[in-house]
């Protein structure tokens, strides 16, 4: 049976994008921005610290930052028109 693996997004800022193919060994490349020279990639959550440390040691990487999506609350509640009326009164 398929088992869900928790993943974390990393933003890897590079000096040159000609090295982006080398990043495939660390995780799945999801997006590349040629103008801003960064790569968004997904890495297994249990390997984030290890991969981040290793990428920071590479000479073609400027910096590595984590995506904060896991920290955000994704449960949004829409206010109904009735509750808006009650707030006005």
Image: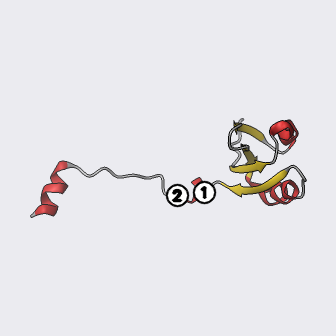
Q: Residue furthest left?
A: 89
Q: Residue at x 39, y 52 (%)?
A: 76
Q: Residue at x 82, y 42 (%)?
A: 16
- Image location (x, y in percent) of residue 21: 85, 36
Is 3 placed left or right of 68 in the picture?
right
Task: Return the residue at label 2.
Answer: 72
Q: Foreground: 35 or 68? A: 35
Check the picture and name the quadrant holding the N terminus: top right
Dividing the picture into quadrants, the one containing residue 24 is: top right
Is 41 placed left or right of 72 in the picture?
right
- Image location (x, y in percent) of residue 77: 34, 52
Q: Residue at x 81, y 47 (%)?
A: 15
Up the image or down, 84 lies above or below 4; here it is below
Colour scheme in use: secondary structure
Check the picture and name the quadrant holding the C terminus: bottom left
What SS does tag 2 mark? loop
Is 20 placed left or right of 9 in the picture?
right
Task: Return the residue at label 1.
Answer: 68
């Amino acid at each position: 049976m398929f088992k869900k693996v928790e993943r974390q997004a990393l933003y890897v800022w590079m000096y040159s994008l000609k090295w982006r193919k080398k990043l495939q060994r660390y995780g799945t490349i999801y997006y590349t921005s040629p103008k801003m020279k960064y790569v968004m990639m997904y890495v297994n959550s249990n390997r984030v610290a290890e991969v981040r440390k290793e990428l920071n040691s590479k000479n073609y990487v400027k910096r590595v930052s984590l995506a904060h999506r896991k920290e955000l609350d994704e449960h949004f509640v829409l206010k109904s028109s009735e509750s808006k009326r009650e707030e006005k009164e």
